């Protein structure tokens, strides 16, 4: 008999692959086969996303989960379908995304988890390079090797390799330690006039990536309020005080925004700017605190060397909280 129904059980957990328990069962989904189709498809990405907690406090922790999908198949009589039943598959999930051109279920990078081949850092400042530990054997930075190990635990599947201050070249090698997968150039910027701001965002691979804004910055405060008019007459004297306000404000608050500039960067960085604009999670290192921000700019005109000669991006960010504390 043909397959009629599929029941999918999703276990979402951290730790090592296959270490799930009954408490990790998050969803049980059942679907029937449409007569004209020969497959039963389940869309689970949005369900899994609910269990990937993306928070950041300048700590660069691995944010991923194991997903074990157990599928039981049934025939028209609701009897277990004997061939390969149940089917058991385990995946590592991150909160990333593919582009439309990548088609269905694209597998993104399995080594260096940044799109660009360039990183900009302030002089004398260390950086972080996110990598997928399972697919990398070693990282070579200016001739110095760092071996990458993978014990299968989610807390180290994504690793953030420290880029020493004033480095110049990063080479990422496959697990055989000899196949060069990616070369990244590090540019160290001396900025004596402006304060560089570090923006950290979740990129398309689902990991934290840093982007420094080196040039001019401007802070803006946008105040909102409501008003009412009151009667200031004192009945006993049939008079009013001229120092008593007739119009008063309430629900006063404000939103702070920050306009920042990248400084001159290579055209290759367009992908980094794009991913920051598309990110749902962005932070800024501001006055020794990691604060959440929202990209207020909603349009991006891609710049090229051919059209623009020197490439600088101006980005407007809005702090993701009100100026007066309204947390209750």
Image (cartoon, rainbow, N blue to C red):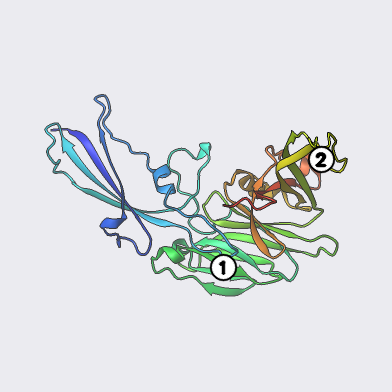
| Furthest residue toward front | 236
Q: Residue at x 83, y 34 (%)?
A: 238
Location of the N terminus (image quadrant): top left
The image shows residue 192, relative to residue 33, as above or below, that is below
- Expressed as whole percent of the image width and height from the top left, the position of residue 293 reads 65, 50
Q: Residue at x 80, y 55 (%)?
A: 215
Residue 88: x, y in percent?
26, 51
The picture places residue 266, in percent across and down from the top left corner, at: 73, 51
Please state the horizontal and vertical placement of residue 18, each as a whole percent of the image: 30, 60
In the shown orientation, is residue 169 left or right of residue 38? right
Number of numbered discs: 2
Residue drawn at (60%, 57%), measured in percent from left and top? 209
**Alpha-carbon neighbours of circle 1 within 10 Å: few (<14), some, or many (≥20)?**
some
For residue 304, say whether it is visible.
no
Q: Quadrant of residue 3?
A: top left
Name the front one of labels 2 and 1: 2
Secondary element at tag 1: strand
Q: Which residue is mark 2?
A: 245
Q: Residue at label 1?
A: 161
Name the outermost residue toward the right: 242
Residue at the location (79% across, 61% down)?
A: 195
| Disc on res. 72 | none
In the figure, is residue 123 to the left or right of 135? right
In the picture, measured across the screen, residue 243 lies left or right of residue 181, that is right
Res. 97 visible in picture: yes
């Amino acid at each position: 008999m043909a397959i009629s129904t599929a029941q999918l059980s999703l276990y979402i957990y951290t730790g090592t692959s296959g270490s799930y328990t009954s408490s990790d069962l998050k969803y049980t989904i059942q679907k029937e086969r449409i007569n004209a189709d020969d497959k039963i498809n389940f869309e689970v990405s949005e369900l899994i996303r609910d269990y990937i907690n993306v928070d950041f406090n300048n700590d660069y922790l691995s944010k991923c989960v194991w997903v074990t999908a157990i599928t039981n198949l049934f025939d028209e009589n609701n009897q277990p379908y004997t061939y390969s039943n149940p089917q058991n598959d385990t995946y590592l999930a991150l909160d990333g995304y593919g582009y439309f051109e990548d088609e269905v279920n694209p597998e993104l990078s399995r080594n260096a988890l940044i799109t660009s081949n360039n990183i900009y850092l302030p002089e004398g400042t260390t950086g972080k390079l996110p990598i997928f530990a399972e697919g990398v054997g070693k990282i070579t930075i200016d001739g110095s090797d760092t071996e990458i190990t993978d014990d299968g635990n989610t807390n180290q599947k994504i690793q953030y390799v420290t880029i020493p201050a004033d480095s110049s070249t990063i080479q990422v090698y496959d697990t055989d330690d000899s196949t060069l997968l990616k070369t990244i150039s590090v540019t160290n910027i001396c900025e004596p006039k402006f304060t560089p701001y570090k923006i950290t965002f979740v990129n398309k691979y689902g990991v934290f990536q840093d982007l420094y804004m080196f040039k001019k910055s401007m802070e803006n405060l946008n105040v909102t309020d409501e008003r009412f008019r009151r009667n200031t007459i004192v009945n006993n004297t049939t008079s009013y005080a001229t120092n008593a306000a007739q119009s008063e404000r309430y629900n006063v608050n404000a939103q702070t925004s920050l306009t920042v500039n990248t400084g001159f960067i290579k055209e290759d960085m367009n992908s980094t700017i794009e991913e920051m604009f598309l990110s749902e999670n962005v932070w800024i290192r501001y006055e020794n605190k990691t604060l959440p921000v929202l990209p207020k700019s909603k349009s991006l005109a891609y710049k090229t060397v051919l059209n623009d000669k020197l490439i600088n991006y101006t980005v407007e960010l809005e702090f993701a909280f009100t100026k007066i504390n309204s947390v209750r």
